[in-house]
Image: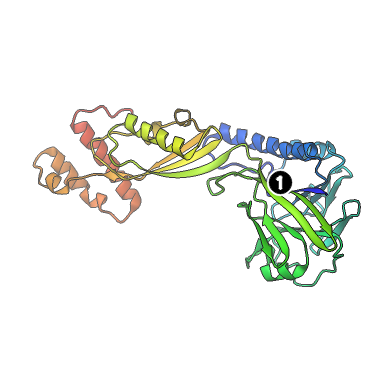
């Protein structure tokens, strides 16, 4: 029973959107390690076929070091076949890496927009596919029937947008159902891991191997499957396997009732522990709720190591818990200060409200004799 791996959207050498430059570079290096880990898994599990469904790298960023990595990794498992369907970020052209690199004999690259085939009779598998030849592909490659040998396992490597109407190869679920393919190995959408069916055709987005920003949250990986076909009937067992070294996660935390920086840190630690986040997590936290205006907290002073995560961003959207009537009628400088800020505190502009809330918090703390230098 042949073993296949379906991966894609690896985006080698693409930049990572982190404010921390050193961690961004570390993530780029980890992405290379993750790709090497995928190849090592193929070798260890004796995979017969690895399908890479586009965007293996980013054409605008790819380095000679990464090209060497690709060649050496593919060559390290000569018994495994690697089939690549170039996508919109790594389209094939006369100037592309695909045309100007000597790959090992076990690498098969689709180089036309129309669907073509690589046949592996020793596996009883035919892999069909197409290539982006530019950054867009507006046609539906499944619009016309494709003659298939129904006794073979027929797989389509497809970088495209299922149900979409944009410039990235729109694929119709109805056409997938009529296509006759046993499995359509999709790339382009970075959220993957869910196996679906269209008629008798299995299809799935594998997602990316590593998230690169906070719009790519969660565990990332690839599909691994044992697959066979007897008497025209497919038998397959698909398993989604994690390969990502890190994962992006987002959290909203209500800090109502927090009275100090120490209490805030404790509440955050409890939330992180409850969510099961550890050193593999890049975390973005949005603080909400209402806290007393004299309470001095500094989200900028929170750090990843204190929470046991790899990377931390904190956005404070909490607002002061105010006794408006008391402050409005306060004849002291506290009341005057509050009344001066009130129009901004009630502004329809969120940034103005946020700035005014911070000013009120710092100002009241200063009037009470509290040291606010560190905040």
- Name the foreground residue: 41 vs 342: 41
Q: Position of residue 42 (x, y in %)?
A: 77, 40
- Name the foreground residue: 327 vs 290: 290
Q: Which residue is at a point 49% across and 30% down the rendered structure image?
A: 308
- Name the foreground residue: 118 vs 120: 120
Q: Which residue is at a point 85% across and 69% down the rendered structure image?
A: 147
Please say if 95 is above or below 304.
Answer: below
What is the crowding at mark 1: few (fewer than 14 residues within 10 Å), some, or many (at least 20)?
Answer: many
Q: Which residue is at a point 52% across and 33% down the rendered structure image?
A: 278
Considering every residue shown, the one lying at the far right of the view is 121
Q: Is residue 91 visible?
A: no
Q: Position of residue 241 (x, y in %)?
A: 67, 44
Q: Position of residue 188 (x, y in %)?
A: 66, 55
Give the quarter of the image for residue 374.
Answer: top left
Please say if 141 is above or below 26.
Answer: below
Q: Which residue is at a point 81% across and 50% down the rendered structure image?
A: 83
Specify the color scheme: rainbow
Please state the total of marks drawn on the protein image: 1
Residue 346 lies left or right of residue 247; in this view the side is: left
- Name the foreground residue: 333 vs 126: 126
Circle 1 residue: 57
Residue 189 lies left or right of residue 257; in this view the side is: right
Q: Secondary structure at mark 1?
A: loop
Q: Is residue 291 visible?
A: yes
Give the quarter of the image for residue 235.
Answer: bottom right
Please say if 119 is above or below 271.
Answer: below
Q: Position of residue 333 (x, y in %)?
A: 13, 38
Residue 122 lies left or right of residue 292; in this view the side is: right
Considering every residue shown, the one lying at the far front of the view is 231
Which quadrant: the C terminus? top left
């Amino acid at each position: 029973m042949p073993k296949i791996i379906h991966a894609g959207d690896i985006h080698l050498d693409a930049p990572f959107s982190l404010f921390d430059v050193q961690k961004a570079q570390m993530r780029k290096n980890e992405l290379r390690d993750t790709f090497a880990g995928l190849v090592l898994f193929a070798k260890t599990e004796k995979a017969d076929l690895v399908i890479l469904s586009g965007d293996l790298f980013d054409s605008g960023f790819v380095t000679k070091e990464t090209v060497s990595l690709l060649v050496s990794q593919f060559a390290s498992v000569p018994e495994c076949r690697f089939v690549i369907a170039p996508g919109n970020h790594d389209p094939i052209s006369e100037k592309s890496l695909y045309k100007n690199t000597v790959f090992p004999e076990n690498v098969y690259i689709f180089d036309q927009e129309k669907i073509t085939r690589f046949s592996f009779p020793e596996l009883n598998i035919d892999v069909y596919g197409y290539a982006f030849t530019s950054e867009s592909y507006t046609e539906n490659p499944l619009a016309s029937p494709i003659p298939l040998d129904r006794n073979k396992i027929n797989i389509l490597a497809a970088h495209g947008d299922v149900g979409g109407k944009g410039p990235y190869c729109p694929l119709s679920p109805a056409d997938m159902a009529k296509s006759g393919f046993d499995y359509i190995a999709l790339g382009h959408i970075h959220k993957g891991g869910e196996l679906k069916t269209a008629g008798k055709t299995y299809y799935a987005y594998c997602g990316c191997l590593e998230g690169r920003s906070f719009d790519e949250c969660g565990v990332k990986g690839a599909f691994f499957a044992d697959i066979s076909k007897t008497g025209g009937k497919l038998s397959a067992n698909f398993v989604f396997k994690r390969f990502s070294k890190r994962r992006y996660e987002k959290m909203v935390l209500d800090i109502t009732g927090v009275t100090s920086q120490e209490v805030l840190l404790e509440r955050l630690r409890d939330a992180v522990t409850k969510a099961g986040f550890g050193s593999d997590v890049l975390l973005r936290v949005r603080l909400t709720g209402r806290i007393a205006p004299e309470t001095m907290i500094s989200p900028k002073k929170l750090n990843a190591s204190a929470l046991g995560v790899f990377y931390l961003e904190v956005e404070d959207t909490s607002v002061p818990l105010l006794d408006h009537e008391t402050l409005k009628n306060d004849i002291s400088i506290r009341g005057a200060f509050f009344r001066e800020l009130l129009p901004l505190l009630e502004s329809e502009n969120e940034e103005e409200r946020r700035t005014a809330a911070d000013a009120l918090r710092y100002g009241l703390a200063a009037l009470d004799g509290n040291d606010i230098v560190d905040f």
